[in-house]
Image (spheres, grey):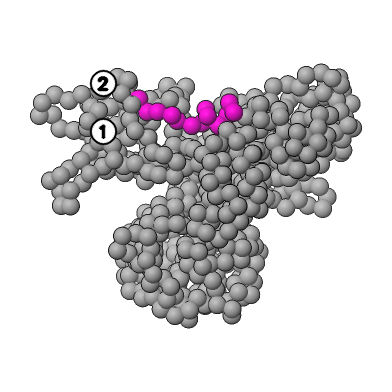
């Protein structure tokens, strides 16, 4: 695993307060192959599939109902998981659960039975999600796989009897290191509630709005591949600010943007079960008060992970040269600046502040997203299909800015 | 400290967004535009194996194009968005060394990605690196300006460069 630490400025003129943004990237080492094989054997996917009556509706794909499109996506996911020797637990739900498989190790051709069970699903009944979520989560709880994901696909608002229990189940998932991937389609599901479930789960979760269920197969496949191809596991990042320095925020960017809670002592820590094959990135903003001219350590970063059966720990320091007041600052690192702008724009989008988000994306040079926001305008906070799709897009887009490799590294202090 | 142009709260030196209103501060707005466009591929150009300088169509934001070759003898007929065979310089009777469903070209959040899908190899050489390497089938790979892509078999290949 390669670590790259970049900061927005290497030197700033003295002032009562100074701010520095830091981008930490962890990327798979292309030469590592043995760890990839080990990690691939260690994926346990728990599928929780909605087969309620509303899944009988049109999917947006010609001639397919939502349930039929879901079956296509699940069959593709099973093939992919079979190819990497993953373990699968699956259950569908309507008024009650229908178990499909339990902790099934997908050796070659072992997925056929599950595939047939999925194919036999019929739509009808209510959205009693807890009925399937509970047994699937119980199967995921043992810490016997490196990466454990509960994958929930739904198109509707849960029945009243499922709302609180599913919240408790999500919390339990978080306590046991199981991340939730929730795929919602249509405009009936409760986006705020499902986002809350994802946040209660372990780091690495996400809520993805699927406009066209034909895209579910691609998106689910992308995410499963990224986890199944992981080359490192047990990734932990700890940021410890120096005296007089505060961590204003720490944001994880992969698989989707998510704020990391700061500890009461001012440090910040984040843990991921595996290093996503696309890489991982965090962006932080540090604020220092009352620094005199000279070189100052702003924060220490400790990054640890497991790779090739060995535990690795690396330490880095973010330092700043404080120049005499009135001096010109050093050149800004464009990638760090753009990442911060994009992260704030995504956050503003999520909060429904279209004007601010548009302004931030325009400053970041992301004109495509700025135009989409402008087009939505005051409809941004709505639960329309377009607004939900945009919220999904922006939360996944910041990592593309952060992990891009087109710009030279400036001002890094590894 | 200069004030934020939006809310007039004094801006902390080094800050990228205003602590008062969240708006981008002038230094951020000045520094950033050089970043995003450089991540964004504007065109794919033939540099070898066909007529040099010809540009391939690229997908608009949020869409995908299938690269491959048409095959109307199939049932149903197989038609792709971009027929790579058209761009290759081939002699009469020579087979097209491209899979029908060679790859998917997708643009999400401004970034161009290529997902190989066919049996024929797809090679990639990142900008500034000396060697080509085969791209894994079924995985989306980001394409950056300066990268090169190769489709084809043996000596009959189409080489594209991203700009």
Residue at x 69% of width, y 36% of height = B24
How packed mark 1 is, by other alpha carbons closer than 10 Å (few <14, some 14-19, many 20 or more), is many
Q: From the viewer's perspective, is A147 left or right of A101? A: right
Residue located farthest toward the left when viewing the structure as drawn: B93
Chain bearing tag 2 is B
Residue at x 48% of width, y 37% of height = B111
Chain bearing tag 1 is B
Inspect the magenta stretch and tell me whether residue A109 lies in it.
Answer: no
Residue at x 87% of width, y 35% of height = A289
The numbered mark at residue B84 is 1
Q: Nearer the viewer, residue B27 or A208?
A: B27
The image quarter in which residue B124 lies? top left
Residue at x 61% of width, y 26% of height = A409
Q: Nearer the viewer, residue B130 or A360?
A: A360
Q: From the viewer's perspective, is A54 left or right of A116? A: right
Q: Is residue A320 above or below residue A183?
A: above
Q: Nearer the viewer, residue A55 or A381?
A: A381
User: Which residues fall within the magenta stretch?
Assistant: B33-45
Q: Is residue A71 above or below residue B111?
A: below
Residue B12 position in % (x across, y down): 81, 33
Inspect the magenta stretch and tell me whether residue B44 lies in it.
Answer: yes
The numbered mark at residue A255 is none
Q: Nearer the viewer, residue B90 or A189?
A: A189
Per the image, the residue denoted by label 2 is: B51
The image quarter in which residue A58 lies? bottom left
Residue B123 position in % (x across, y down): 35, 32
Considering only order in the chain, which callout, 2 or 1, is on the residue closer to the N terminus? Answer: 2
Disc 2 secondary structure class = loop
């Amino acid at each position: 695993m390669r670590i790259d630490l970049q900061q927005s400025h290497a030197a700033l003129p003295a002032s009562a307060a100074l701010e520095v943004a830091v981008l930490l990237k962890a990327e798979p080492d292309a030469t590592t192959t043995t760890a990839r094989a080990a990690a691939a054997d260690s994926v346990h996917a728990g599928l929780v599939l909605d087969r309620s009556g509303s899944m009988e509706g049109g999917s947006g794909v010609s001639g397919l109902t939502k349930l039929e499109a879901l079956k296509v996506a699940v069959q593709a996911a099973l093939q992919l998981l079979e190819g990497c020797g993953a373990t699968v637990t699956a259950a569908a739900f309507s008024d009650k659960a229908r178990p499909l498989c339990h902790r099934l190790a997908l050796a070659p051709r072992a997925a056929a039975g599950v595939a047939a069970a999925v194919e036999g699903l019929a739509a009808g009944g209510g959205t009693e999600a807890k009925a399937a979520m509970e047994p699937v989560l119980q199967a995921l709880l043992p810490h016997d796989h490196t990466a454990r994901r509960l994958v929930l696909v739904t198109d509707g608002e849960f029945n009243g009897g499922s709302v609180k229990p599913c919240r408790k189940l999500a919390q339990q998932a978080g306590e046991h290191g199981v991340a939730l991937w929730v795929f919602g389609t249509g405009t009936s599901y409760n986006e705020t509630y499902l986002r809350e479930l994802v946040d209660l789960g372990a780091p690495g979760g996400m809520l993805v709005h699927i406009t066209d269920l034909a895209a579910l197969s691609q998106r689910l496949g992308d995410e499963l591949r990224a986890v199944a191809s992981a080359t490192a596991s047990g990734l932990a990042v700890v940021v410890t600010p120096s005296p007089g320095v505060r961590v204003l925020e720490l944001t994880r960017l992969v698989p989707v943007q998510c704020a990391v809670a700061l500890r009461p002592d001012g440090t910040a820590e984040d843990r991921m079960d595996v290093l996503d094959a696309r890489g991982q990135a965090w962006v932080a903003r540090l604020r220092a008060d009352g620094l005199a001219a000279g070189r100052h350590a702003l924060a220490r970063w400790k990054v640890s992970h497991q790779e090739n059966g060995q535990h690795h720990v690396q330490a880095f320091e973010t330092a700043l040269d404080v120049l005499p007041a009135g001096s010109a600052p050093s050149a800004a690192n464009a990638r760090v600046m753009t990442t911060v702008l994009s992260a704030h724009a995504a956050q503003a989008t999520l909060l429904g502040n279209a004007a601010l988000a548009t302004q931030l994306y325009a400053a970041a040079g992301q004109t495509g997203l700025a135009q989409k926001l402008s087009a939505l305008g005051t409809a941004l906070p709505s639960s329309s299909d377009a607004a939900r799709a945009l919220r999904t897009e922006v939360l996944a887009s910041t990592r593309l800015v952060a992990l891009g490799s087109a710009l030279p590294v400036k001002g890094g202090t590894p | 400290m200069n004030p934020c142009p939006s809310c007039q709260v004094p801006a902390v030196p080094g800050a990228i967004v205003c602590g008062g209103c969240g708006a981008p501060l002038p230094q951020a707005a000045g520094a950033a535009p050089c970043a995003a466009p450089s991540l964004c591929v504007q065109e794919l150009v033939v540099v070898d194996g066909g007529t040099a300088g010809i540009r391939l169509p690229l997908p608009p934001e949020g869409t995908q194009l299938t690269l491959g070759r048409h095959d109307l003898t199939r049932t149903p007929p197989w038609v792709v968005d971009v027929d790579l065979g058209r761009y290759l310089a081939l002699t009469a009777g020579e087979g097209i060394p491209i899979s029908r469903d060679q790859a998917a070209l997708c643009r999400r959040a401004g970034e161009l990605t290529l997902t190989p899908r066919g049996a024929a190899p797809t090679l990639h050489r990142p900008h500034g690196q000396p060697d080509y390497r085969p791209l894994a089938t079924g995985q989306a790979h980001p394409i950056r300006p300066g990268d090169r892509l190769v489709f084809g078999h043996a000596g009959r290949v189409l080489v594209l460069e991203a700009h």
